[in-house]
Image (tube, helix red, strand yellow):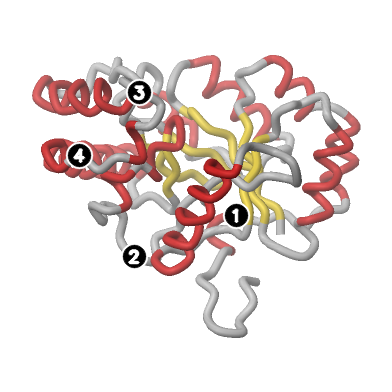
Amino acid sequence: MLIVTADDYGREQAATDSILLCGSRNRITSASAMVFMQDSERAAALARDSPIEFGLHLNFTELLNGASAPGPLRLHHDRVRRFLTRHKLAPVLYNPQLQHSFRILFKAQCAEYERLYHLPPLFYNGHHHMHLCANVLLGGLMLRSSRIRNSFSFEAGEKGVFNRAYREIVRRWIRTRYTSTDSFYSIKPAHDLRRLRRLFERSHAEVVEIETHPEIAEETTLLLGAEYEELLADAQLGTFRDVVKRGPGTPRL
């Protein structure tokens, strides 16, 4: 099964509109929505007429620029943002002094999502993939069995030994606690159709999620193009709602 998820819905008008366009042409299956952002309110209203599935795009790293974000929440967010963006290894370090702020931010974003979309998030992922940072995972912020985005998967020869080893630890953590896909890839580089074809073929045997950002012109061109449409024609498309937690000897579908 193949899930194609567009991130940053509601971040700004350009992101919202490009995602809705791709959704209306059945080029994506899901979108992850940001709350407390510039276009969050309008995006939620427009989502009611969209055929795609929506989840929550947790934001711990980009300034909350929406009018509905209360001042105290911005203070917690600023503390967490400064920590996570200080060094590239910060996300893998658990900071006990910030756990209270992480919890407040998580609960506030979930509550705001429910206010805007009138139901709890169907799945979670994170802006800059921070739903997998140590304070979120070790802090147990997401309920067990929640549907969440997996850590990046790589093809042979990609990334270094440390990167691959760390991501395998995260994938095992996800596998034992949450419901997720078998593998997860970025659509980038958008010009590499041979790679994309391999990923689509992989989805015939396992559950694959592909991440895209349609507000990027190169990705929009790919998503709306004839070659991508041809690839989709042979794919078994699905959403996170279709993904189930694997038991011993039990397939995901």
Residue 87: image tag: 3
Q: CA distance from mark 2 to mark 3?
A: 29 Å
| Crowd band around label 1 with a 10 angstrom C-alpha radius: few (<14), some (14–19), many (20+) | many
Q: Of tags 1 and 3, which is closer to the observer?
A: 3
Quarter in which the C terminus is drawn: bottom right
Q: Amino acid at mark 4?
A: Asn
The answer to whether marks 1 and 3 mark residues whose Cβ atoms lie closer than 8 Å is no
Q: Is residue 4 above or below residue 68?
A: below
Position of residue 192 in the picture relative to residue 133 (left or right)? right
Q: Which residue is label 4 attached to?
A: 95
C-alpha separation, residue under disc 1 versus residue under disc 3: 34 Å
Neighbours of disc 4 within 10 Å: few (<14), some (14-19), many (20+): some
Find the distance from the CA under tag 2 to the CA under tag 4: 21 Å
Left or right: 7, with 137 as reference point: right
Helix, strand or loop under label 3: loop
Q: Which residue is mark 2?
A: 144
**Could you say where residue 98 lies in the image, as x and y percent from the top left?**
15, 36
